[in-house]
Amino acid sequence: MERSSRPFGYGNGLRTLSIATVIAIAVTLSLVFFYAPLEAEQGFLQKIFYVHVPLAIVALCGFVLGGLLAIQHLRTRDPRWDMRSYVVIHMSLIFAVGTLITGSIWAKGSWGHWWVWSEPTLVSFLIIFLLYATYQPLRFAIEDPERQARYASVFAITAGAFVPLNFLAVRLSTEYLHPRVLGSTSNLPGSMALTFLVSLGSMSLLFTTLCKYELTAKHTRSQLRALRRRLSGEHADAPRARSAVPAIQHVAAASTRASVRSVP
Amino acid sequence: MVATILSETPALPLHTAGKYVAGAYIVLFAIVLIYVAIMAIRLSRIERDLGELLSISERTGTGGPHTNPAGEQAGAGTERQDQQPESTLA
């Protein structure tokens, strides 16, 4: 009985993950400020590298992951995959905002300008951000939950494929003005590379923890809504108010449909 | 003890770059802090909704596992709870 009231266990391991994230971030900050040496050219300003670049990498990987989860949703028609894709893209957008702000601060300190339009890496990241900024309005524009989930998945797959293509195009065409990370990590001194990798790991942990929090909160809300409907005598399939958030109260019905479809 | 640790740690060469580095790290913390604040608001809303649902279930008598399907009052169901604890576990 207890198990059936928490069928997906989104909240499982959340406490451990939260503690691990806090410890990882504390270790990262210690390494950044007290272990990693000062860079010869930029000096103390280069410390922004340890927050800006991991934020950008995690955000871009999150967008791609959102696309992969959307593929899974289209394959199975299970709304849980749509919810995961939605949450991952939502969180990646927040990380992308952080990337843009920290990047602007770094640009101001390094180049004297908040934004440089001639820099392809900056502009391409902004394009990706603006592309994904249309994801939520797209969802909100479609009232029917199933159609909304399907269209959003198609968008997530297309945009997710655009991210690595865009990254490659920029790398091939750039004049190498922007600090290169993936190509030059081997050129970093060992202490800098270690700090960077730890920072990347802690950002990934933070991303995972926040996604799990979001999934747990959304699932709890949807369970509460379902319970309210049941208590007020409303039918479970009654139309819900328009929302950009995926409808997962129909999970049981959709899972049944998916299993019936998979039977030959 | 804190003073000893601080005296042992190397001084950070802040110079003019200090404000930019501080700004970048504050942005990260602000994002996390805003998120935690939003989660706290959501949690309080969930708590309020749960309270409402609990009061609705008490009024209608449909919430507990001891409710009689024939429409028995919640109070009567509570009495049964004391009498038949084994049947609810089964």
Image (spheres, rainbow, N blue to C red):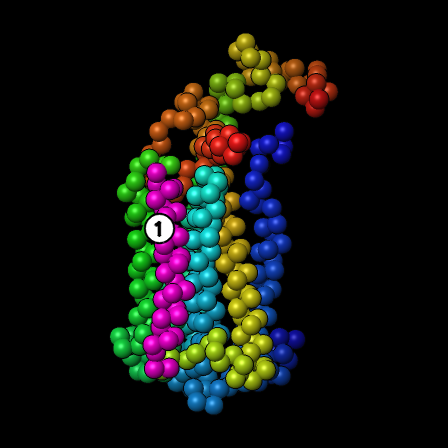
Work out whether residue A192 or residue A254 is closer to the camera in this orientation and state it. Answer: A254
Compared to residue B41, the image places residue A51 above or below, namely below
Secondary element under disc 1, as helix, strand or loop, is helix
Compared to residue A240, the image places residue A165 above or below, namely below
Identify the residue shown where x is 61% and y is 50%. Answer: A13
Identify the residue shown where x is 32% and y is 68%. Answer: A124
Judging by the rendered image, the residue that carries numbered circle 1 is: A155
**Left or right: B23 as drawn, with respect to A210:** left
Work out whether residue B22 or residue A185 is closer to the camera in this orientation and state it. Answer: A185
| Residue A10 falls within the magenta-colored stretch | no
Identify the residue shown where x is 29% and y is 48%. Answer: A137
Percent coordinates x, y for residue A147 in the rendering: 34, 38
Q: Range of the magenta residues?
A: A147-176
What chain does badge 1 belong to?
Answer: A
At label 1, which amino acid type do we have? Phe
Identify the residue shown where x is 63% and y is 79%. Answer: B5
Q: Residue furthest right?
A: B86
Q: Quadrant of the N terminus of chain A?
A: top right
Q: For label 1, count other residues whose C-alpha is less than 10 Å away and answer few (under 14), some (14-19) or many (20+).
A: many
